[in-house]
Image: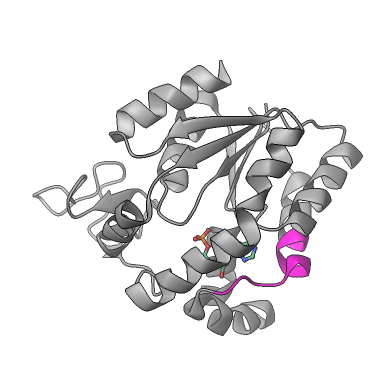
């Protein structure tokens, strides 16, 4: 099964993708994670995208489509979770072509509904484990009192450089201008399912499980 998690920054795509990786042996393909890796490694491409990401703008379709194309060649396990991709109509069309080339199908697009106030609150409180990427939130899921990640035991946590209010405003604007029309696109293809992204993490997880069957 191949699915897309669709929603604005802070909707909980990464958190829910982690559950699907654990429970269904799926592969999370987060273009945001791939781009951050490229940036941290100091590669040429990483240098090109660093400023764009810091501002909260979208990087070019060409770059992200290239990243996804590479990953689709590898092991498929329980299927792919596209997290933060596609973000434009050009990316959605490219994904359809890539899946067709590899004989795969897109089974479901899970749209996560949230409101902007919740997004700002979540994002400015967000941190991740440096060891395994487990997502924490100062309010809803604080780092354990012993200072160790509950998943891998690492004691190092980081906050994303673009998780600040200025960049977030821009990321939200990019979402509404360029990504939100994908809801109509996938609705028209009969692939869209809504879940309420505002619920508790476990409630959202259960809703997604129901939608995926
Ligand atoms: P994310 O981790 O998904 O919030 O992505 C972080 C940043 O990476 C975004 O604000 C964009 O600058 C860039 N990015 C991630 N995925 C894409 C994509 N599919 N298309 C364009 N830019 C992307």
Residue at image position (30%, 41%) is 151
Residue at image position (61%, 58%) is 31
Q: Residue 114, relative to residue 106: is it above or below?
A: below
Quarter holding ligand 1: bottom right
Quadrant occupied by the C terminus: top right
Majority SS type along the magenta span: helix
Residue, far right: 101
Q: Position of residue 121 (x, y in %)?
A: 26, 58
Apparent side of residue 13 relative to residue 179 in the rendered image (left or right): left
**Residue 130 found in image quarter:** bottom left
Front position in the image: 89 or 163: 89
Apparent side of residue 8 relative to residue 189 in the rendered image (left or right): left
Q: Residue 98, relative to residue 138: is it above or below?
A: above
Quadrant occupied by the N terminus: top right
Q: Position of residue 68 (x, y in %)?
A: 72, 54
**From which residue to which does the magenta span run?**
57-66
**Residue 6 found in image quarter:** top right
Image coloring type: one colour
Q: Is-magenta flag for residue 166?
A: no
Residue 109 visible, this angle: yes
Q: Position of residue 100 (x, y in %)?
A: 88, 38
């Amino acid at each position: 099964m191949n699915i897309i998690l669709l929603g604005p920054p802070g909707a909980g795509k990464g958190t829910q993708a982690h559950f699907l990786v654990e429970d269904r042996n799926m592969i999370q393909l987060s273009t945001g994670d791939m781009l951050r890796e490229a940036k941290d490694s100091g590669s040429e491409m990483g240098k090109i995208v660093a400023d764009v990401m810091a501002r909260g703008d979208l990087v070019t379709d060409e770059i992200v489509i290239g990243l996804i194309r590479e990953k689709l060649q590898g092991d498929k396990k329980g299927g792919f979770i596209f997290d933060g991709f596609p973000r434009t109509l050009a990316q959605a069309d490219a994904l359809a072509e890539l899946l067709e080339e590899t004989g795969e199908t897109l089974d479901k697009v899970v749209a996560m509904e949230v409101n902007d106030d919740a997004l700002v609150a979540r994002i400015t409180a967000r941190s991740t484990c440096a060891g395994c990427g487990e997502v924490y939130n100062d309010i809803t899921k604080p780092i354990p009192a012993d200072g160790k990640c509950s998943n891998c035991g690492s004691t190092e946590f980081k906050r994303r450089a673009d998780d600040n209010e200025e960049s977030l405003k821009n990321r939200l604007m990019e979402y509404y201008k360029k990504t939100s029309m994908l809801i109509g696109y996938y609705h028209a293809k009969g692939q869209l399912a809504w879940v309420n992204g505002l619920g508790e993490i476990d409630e959202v997880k259960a809703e997604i499980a129901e939608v995926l069957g």
